[in-house]
Amino acid sequence: MQIRPILAALRRHRMATVLIALEIALACAVLCNACFLIAGRIDAIQVDSGVDEASLATVQLAGYENAHAVDLNARVLAGLGSIAGVQSVSLLNSIPFGARRGTAGITTDMAGKHFGGVVEFYVGGPGSLSALGTRLVAGRNPQPDDFRPFTALMPDDASVQVTRALAEHLWPGADPLGKEFWLDKSHFRVVGVIDHLVRPDPGGWPGDSRDWSVFVPAQSSVYLSGSYLLRAAPTDLPRVLRDARAAIAKIAPDAVLDQDGTQTLGDLRTRSFQKDRAMIGMLVGVIVALLLVTALGIVGLASFWVAQRRRQIGIRRAIGATRRDILHYFQTENFLIVSFGIVLGMVLAYALNLLLMTHYELPRLPLVYLPIGAAALWLLGQLAVLGPALRAAAVPPVVATRSV
Amino acid sequence: MFTYYLDLALRSLKRNKVLTALMVIAIAVGIGASMTTLTVMHLLSGDPVPTRSGTLFYPQVDGNPTPGDFKQPLDVMDYQSAVDLWGAHRADAQTLVVDSPVRLSAPGVNLPTLMPSMLSTTSDFFPMFDVPFRYGSGWSADDDARHARVAVISDDLNHKLFGGRDSVGQVLRLRDTDVRIVGVLRPWRPSPVFYTVAGGRFANGDTADFYGKTQDVFTPFFTGLELNDGNFQQFTCWHMPERPGHLQNSPCAWVRLWVQLGDAGKVAAYKQFLDGYAAQQAALGRIVRPQNTRLRSLMQWLDYNGVVPGDVRLQTWLAFAFLAICLFNMIGLLLAKFLRRSGEIGVRRALGASRGAVFAQCLVEAGLVGLIGGIGGLGLTLLGLWLVRRQPVAYADLAHLDVSMFVATFVTAIAASLLAGVLPAFRASRVAPGLQLKTL
């Protein structure tokens, strides 16, 4: 296929060529960045919580008097524990994808000079960590005498488990076992490392920091009350939670059941990523509409050019060009225009990404998106031009002999 | 002349229906997407108290005694600073604000106990923020001072508890205290719920919750503090509070203050007062960064908190990039359409039409495409807003088209298509008559 005559013809239609190329360039920029945003959201939705979501549910109570909190805990633990199918009931202040009650900044020295980051403190009663089903990768799980009574917001001294991500962040490369950190005056010593334990609100945290969690063993107290973790076989769970909701009215008439917070962890997870799903839907919608409009633009302009060049096509056919030659001519022409657009589009994609990076703290666009976007647009261009090009190929040579 | 051009435009659009349809679809889709997101932006970035937002200010002093080079004061104040500043009564009006969940039941109403959010505030709150009442009214400054057991409830709660009838004089039990209802609000939906906005800059753009509903119960500030003691949440603490939930003398920031200042002179005077207070407290050793005071206006405060959710801003960017693509598309198609009629234009030019006349004729045609596209775009905007209302976000119920955005839809559509038409029309008006006539 000869490119030179095509370029010569395009030079005659400079403005239309530039317009289509610009449209392709913009489409390429938006397409690459939208795909990148979608990938980011999908990554967020698929976060590994590190817990057995399918077997877990939570019951949340409010409105009771602090003076009755410990008594309430005892009643609820006993009452919910007697529901058929319940494997365990335990106290846990924060719930993955649910209630958030332990977000605080820690320091790695007693004086509070070295800030270690904002982490989630999961303060849990006996049995709660094993109910969560986290996987221990080093050290030990809490032992019965690790669960101590406390009277302030947080136990003031405890042996804790931290996630691997948090250990890597606080003490990169070092063995975290035996290391210490502080929350104001409260002191914590690491005795175990768990694989994953996601924050209650992973959506708002970048990268590994969504997994910065600490498990603090503690006894039932005013500040560890009203928030319970239920474990049951996945098939029993919906029924168990229904029974638990009904039972609460009898077990704890002095408390108000938080209808919204009392859910299975699966439902909580779905709910916490609803916004991301809606955003993915919107981005996919934009991409589809974008490709559609671009394709329609190519069809429109190619049709116009075919109609305009009917006579020339007839002449070419009359002097020996085959249908295939005509078809290839328009296909190559489209390929060239789209290629101009893509080259410009890659630059634009990067510029748009830089803009998004400054405004939305997005990471840099990985290079792999550029060839994907380019391939998509080449394919789109070829599909869009196929119809008009076939129509051009069907022009009979006899057209050359007719005056318009 | 205009009607003649309109007639020509209609004929031309009818002649090539496919190309016309392509252009109309492109502009309609582009307008639909951008106007949907722009409407949401418009609703979320609007003024929550249009009648008086220019006079509302949010004072801040840095109550955190931890030494350090912090550039900004904490988003909310500690109890002592807030109450001192409020008690000085240096502004035209001032109100303290703190919210907490409270156990609520109504004797004689057969409903399970509720846990609504209660706003503890002072009497100026209602006149200051232009809060509309259906029945009764707010309480007096005297009620504030006496820690009166009174309450104002929202329209929502009034419907839930009393079926919407006049419930002034009824009694509510808040935790263990009986309060008498003195006022019932009309439906009131400031967007965002500006008086409790704080911490937006730590939210990573996830600020949709600022646009939720208002609190259901309003009680005098000190009454609320007494009856719900132990259930207050701090914004942040620099040390562990000794009795969590009871924050009056705690090392925590949790109280907001709003002031109303009628003119620029008063604003300057109040800032001076604020600085003076901080300096005095620094001398007493309670404050370590007396220079860290701020007096932002309501809109500045919302801006500082970046209240418009990041997702919404991102969607708006995307929609406008999309509109730009649609416009490029339309320019290309219009160019094709006009130049295809070169022969016709050549005849008109040869018969004496000026370049301006050809240009105008082409623009009328582009504008007509814009108008039709605008109608399609309006439909798509309504569809888009319907989709937004189905999203699981706090502001979903707000997403409706108002008159200004209705007009803006058409203005944008026609302006966009005229803009797209300029270049093709210019090219068309440059068609040389002689060359065209020769080929005929």
Image (spheres, coloured by chain):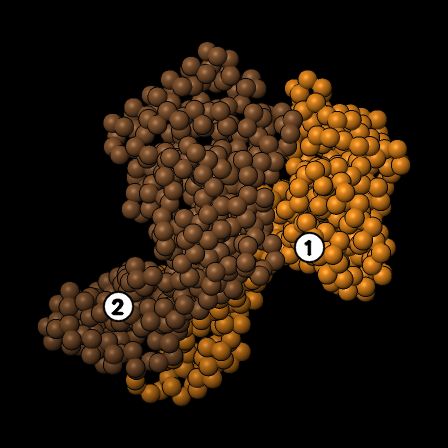
Chain colours: A orange, B brown
Residue A278: x, y in percent? 56, 59
Could you tell me which chain the residue with mark 2 belongs to?
B
Task: Say whether residue A124 is visible.
Answer: no
Q: Is residue B331 left or right of residue A286?
A: left
* Image spot of residue A29 (x, y percent): 50, 54
The residue at 33%/80% (across/down) is B16
Q: How many marks?
A: 2
How would you rate the neighbour count of disc 1 (Cα within 10 Å): few for under 14, some for 14-19, many for 20 or more? many
* Secondary structure of residue under mark 2: helix
- Which of A70 and B278 lies nearest the eye of the viewer? A70
Q: Which residue is mark 2?
A: B367
Relative height, residue A20 to residue A90 (above, below): below
Q: Is residue B333 left or right of residue A156?
A: left
Q: Is residue B329 above or below residue B100?
A: below
The amino acid beneath tag 2 is Gly
Residue drawn at point x = 51 percent, y = 50 percent: B172
Q: Is residue A183 above or below residue A364?
A: above
Residue drawn at x 49%, y 24% is B80
Q: From the viewer's perspective, is B437 left or right of A61?
A: left
Q: Amino acid at mark 1?
A: Thr
Q: On what subunit does the disc labeled 1 rest? A: A
Q: Position of residue B323 (x, y in %)?
A: 40, 60
- The answer to whether tags 2 and 1 share a subunit is no
